[in-house]
């Protein structure tokens, strides 16, 4: 597993490659979603906890490191010392998440994470705001989405990303 900053920097690189602007809220949600999909595949992605804040899932260390950008575009990678490289599995996972979610607005990504019975909504209901979102909630939610994709693929041959 790696830091949330390492994963955020991967998304920043993809955004620059594809000419897409990203904000703090988009990066928060993309890192969270990528971690959820990794957990669904029994492979953790980040070692930090994710918390249920008012505007959705937040990784506090990432939030604080992105504070200098405010609500505007994140224009450069986040400085990090001793960053570990990601492996081919993680790179493929991040590319898949990027293709499915990378062009969504912060508002859309926040809305997706706020749906009923998402890990965020369950955590707020069970433990309150600013609580750590249990990885089991994330794993179960994204595994359910993964199973839906597999079912759709079998039924229709070409699944649409499940959000």
Image: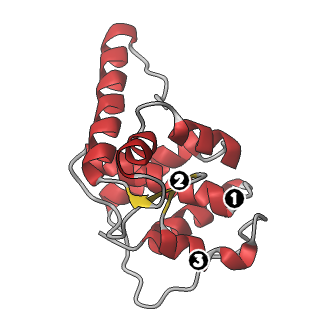
Measure the C-alpha gap from mark 3 to mark 2: 16 Å
Q: Residue at x 28, y 53 (%)?
A: 135
Q: Which disc number belongs to residue 51?
A: none
- Report helix, strand or loop for mark 3: helix
Query: Seen from this angle, which residue lies furthest top?
Result: 155
Tell me which corner region of the image, top left, top right, bottom left or bottom right, holds residue 156. top left
In the image, 36 versus 41, the foreground residue is 36
> Along the polypeptide, which appears first: circle 3 or circle 1?
1
Q: Quadrant of the N terminus?
A: bottom left
Q: Position of residue 37 (x, y in %)?
A: 36, 45
Whichever of labels 3 and 2 marks the residue nearer the N terminus, that label is 2
- Label 1 sits on residue: 22
46 versus 36 height, above or below: below
Are the residues at dot 1 and dot 2 in contact (C-beta closer than 8 Å)? yes
Secondary structure beneath dot 1 equals loop
Nearer-N-terminus badge (1/2): 1
Q: Which residue is mark 3?
A: 64
Q: Which quarter of the picture shows residue 110?
A: top right
Residue at the spot of label 2: 30
Label 2 neighbour load within 10 Å: few <14, some 14-19, many 20+: many
Residue under the image location 48 percent in, 29 percent down? 161
Judge by depth and name the residue closer to the eye, 13 or 120.
120
Colouring method of the image = secondary structure
């Amino acid at each position: 597993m790696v830091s949330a900053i390492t994963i955020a920097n991967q998304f920043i690189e993809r955004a620059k490659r594809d000419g897409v602007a990203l904000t703090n809220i988009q990066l928060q949600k993309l890192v969270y979603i990528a971690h959820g999909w990794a957990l669904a595949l029994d492979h953790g992605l980040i070692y930090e906890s994710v918390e249920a804040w008012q505007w959705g899932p937040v990784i506090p260390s990432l939030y604080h490191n992105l504070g200098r950008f405010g609500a505007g575009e994140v224009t450069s990678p986040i400085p990090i010392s001793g960053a570990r490289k990601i492996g081919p599995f993680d790179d493929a996972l991040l590319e898949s998440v990027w293709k499915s979610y990378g062009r969504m607005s912060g508002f859309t990504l926040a809305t997706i994470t706020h749906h009923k019975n998402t890990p965020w909504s369950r955590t707020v209901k069970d433990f309150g705001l600013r609580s750590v979102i249990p990885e089991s909630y994330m794993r179960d939610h994204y595994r359910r989405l993964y199973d839906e994709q597999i079912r759709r693929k079998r039924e229709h041959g070409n699944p649409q990303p499940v959000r």
